[in-house]
Amino acid sequence: MVKIIRNITALFFIPAVAAAAYTLIKSFLSFSAASGNRHMPFWAGIFCYILFQIAFYKPLRTYIFGHELSHAVAGLLSGARIKRFNVGKQSGSVVLTKDNIWITLAPYMFPIYVFALIIIYIMLGWIADIRLFYGYFLFLTGFFIAFHVALTIYILGIGQPDLKVYGVFFSYVVIAAVNVLVFGLLMALAFPEEINIWELATESCRNILSFYKFICMGAAEIWLAFQKTS
């Protein structure tokens, strides 16, 4: 019964996730097109990582370390203690004193290297003028975002037991929803002059409501047409 409720809840939230994702992508592409070459280092970083993975190899050990570290950080933030932390070439593990959905799915939702990079850049900006290094920051941001997305898709494609804990369908919807929120926040932090997080959130809410209104009106018309024919 719990699994059925989770799946129904996930199904209900799919339109909201789709509308929010559409808003984020539209906003990002709009400001990217308007900014000209200013943010080319970001796109160069994405391109360079993709080229690196295709031409050389998948840096799985680096990804696995970040994967297990994400479990550990989520656990610490949830009040758990780390009992064991292990990272190998092909797999890793972390044993915590408690578990919840955020701990279990954290590696698929939070690009920990991107967060670390942005936090370091912001903290350095408090003590020194580092605007000259903004291009390098954008390049690394794009590089690690591509790293996270590409290897997360790869890892999910070969199957992960983490998703079975709360149900695969429900987990995928949660991962998609949180990724939209997280990438919205990351874009606002990386491009503070171009993306306003509150305006993005407001537009997302409007689009979500419009999407549900469209679905409800369509469902009502189908129901009325069915009633007339029966």
Image: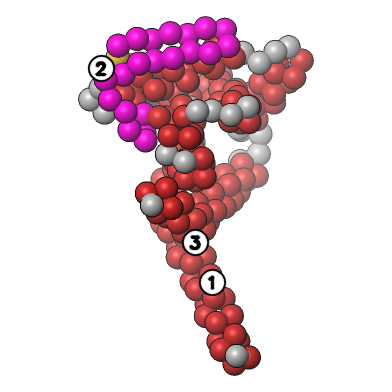
**What is the CA distance from the residue labelled 3 to the residue labelled 2?**
41 Å
Query: Residue 100 colored magenta?
Result: yes
Tag 3 residue: 207
Tag 2 residue: 81
User: Residue 26, labelled with which disc?
Assistant: none
Instruction: Depth check: give the residue in front, 38 or 188.
Output: 188
Mark 1, other Cα within 10 Å: few <14 / some 14–19 / many ≥20: few
Which color mode does the image show? secondary structure
Mark 3, other Cα within 10 Å: few <14 / some 14–19 / many ≥20: some
Relative horizontal placement of residue 225, taking residue 80 as reference (left or right)? right
**Which amino acid type is marked by label 3?**
Asn
Q: Which one is in front in this view, the residue at disc 3 or the one at disc 2?
A: 2
Q: Which one is in front in this view, the residue at disc 2 or the one at disc 1?
A: 2
Q: Looking at the image, is mark 1 or mark 3 earlier in the sequence?
A: 3
Q: How many marks?
A: 3
- The quadrant holding residue 40 is top right
Mark 2, other Cα within 10 Å: few <14 / some 14–19 / many ≥20: some
Instruction: Depth check: give the residue in front, 175 or 95.
Output: 95
Start and end of the magenta stretch?
Answer: 83-103
Q: Looking at the image, is mark 3 or mark 2 earlier in the sequence?
A: 2
Residue 38 placement (x, y as % from top left): 61, 33
Residue at 43% across / 59% down in the picture?
A: 205
**Which amino acid type is marked by label 2?**
Arg
Q: Is residue 200 above or below residue 212?
A: above
Tag 1 residue: 214
Tell me if residue 151 can be seen. Answer: yes
